[in-house]
């Protein structure tokens, strides 16, 4: 379980093909605090630490993960948003994030609004996921508030701190981002879909 509050960014140091999987070696400021089998959200995708070296660690992405996320677009040097799992004694500063990417979206526009940034993201139309104004959504692991919402797109406003502290500052129009929709909204959408099917 995560909150969508990014702790730090890491850098991809090495990428190795491992049969149908891919092993990623990354470095980050808290590498020495990690443990084998620990869950760590990478751009919102929960991956397990399988190996730790002096200044780097390794995670493995299986084929299903590669198909659902933007990990296939990573290269050596890619900056990745990182968050360790929620401690029960901690505060839930963002919202409930599972670390399970629902689908990817595409950056349609980025507007510089004199210090803050307004980003619009579109995704393949679906009845399973939805956004609502002032609701929550996770983009590349970052908990954000929806500013505007449409059928298959939404916009978020990024404050300067989030822009600088995460990999949001590297986004370009056309980039693919990981999306995790609000868990409560997903349950509501599924229930409504089920009720309509019964009728």
Image (tube, rainbow, N blue to C red):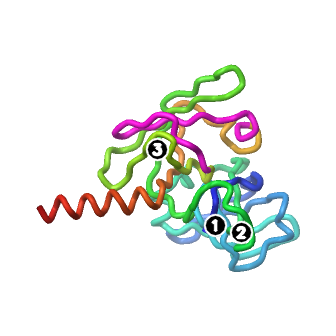
Disc assigned to residue 105: 3
Q: Residue at x 36, y 44 (%)?
A: 124
Write the start and end of the magenta stretch as one range. Answer: 143-163
Query: From the image, which quarter does the C terminus lie in?
Result: bottom left
Separation of residues labelled 2 and 3 (CA atoms): 26 Å
Q: Residues within 10 Å of mark 2 (few under 14, many from 20)?
A: many
Residue marked by disc 1: 23
Helix, strand or loop at disc 3? strand
- Lower sequence index among marks 3 and 1: 1
Residue 22 image position (x, y, % from top left)? 58, 65
Q: Residues within 10 Å of mark 3 (few under 14, many from 20)?
A: many
Query: From the image, which quarter does the N terminus lie in?
Result: bottom right
- Whether 164 is drawn above or below 5: the answer is above
Residue 49 image position (x, y, % from top left)? 69, 73
Q: Nearer the viewer, residue 69 or 138?
A: 138
- Lower sequence index among marks 1 and 2: 1
Q: Is residue 155 magenta?
A: yes
């Amino acid at each position: 379980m995560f909150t969508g509050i990014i702790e730090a960014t890491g850098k991809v140091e090495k990428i190795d093909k491992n049969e149908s999987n891919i092993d990623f070696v990354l470095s980050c400021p808290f590498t020495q605090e990690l443990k084998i089998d620990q869950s760590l959200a990478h751009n919102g995708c929960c991956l397990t630490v399988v190996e730790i070296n002096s200044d780097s660690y390794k995670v493995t992405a299986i084929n299903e993960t590669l198909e659902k996320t933007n990990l296939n677009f990573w290269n050596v040097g890619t900056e990745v948003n990182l968050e360790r799992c929620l401690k029960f004694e901690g505060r839930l500063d963002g919202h409930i994030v599972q670390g399970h990417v629902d689908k990817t979206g595409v950056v349609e526009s980025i507007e510089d609004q004199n210090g803050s940034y307004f980003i619009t993201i579109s995704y393949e139309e679906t009845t399973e996921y939805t956004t609502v104004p002032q609701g929550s959504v996770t983009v590349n692991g970052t908990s954000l508030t929806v500013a505007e919402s449409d059928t298959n797109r939404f916009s978020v406003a990024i404050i300067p701190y989030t822009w600088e502290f995460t990999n949001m500052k590297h986004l370009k129009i056309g980039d693919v981002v990981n999306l995790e929709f609000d868990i409560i909204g997903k349950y509501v959408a599924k229930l409504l879909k089920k009720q309509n099917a019964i009728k």
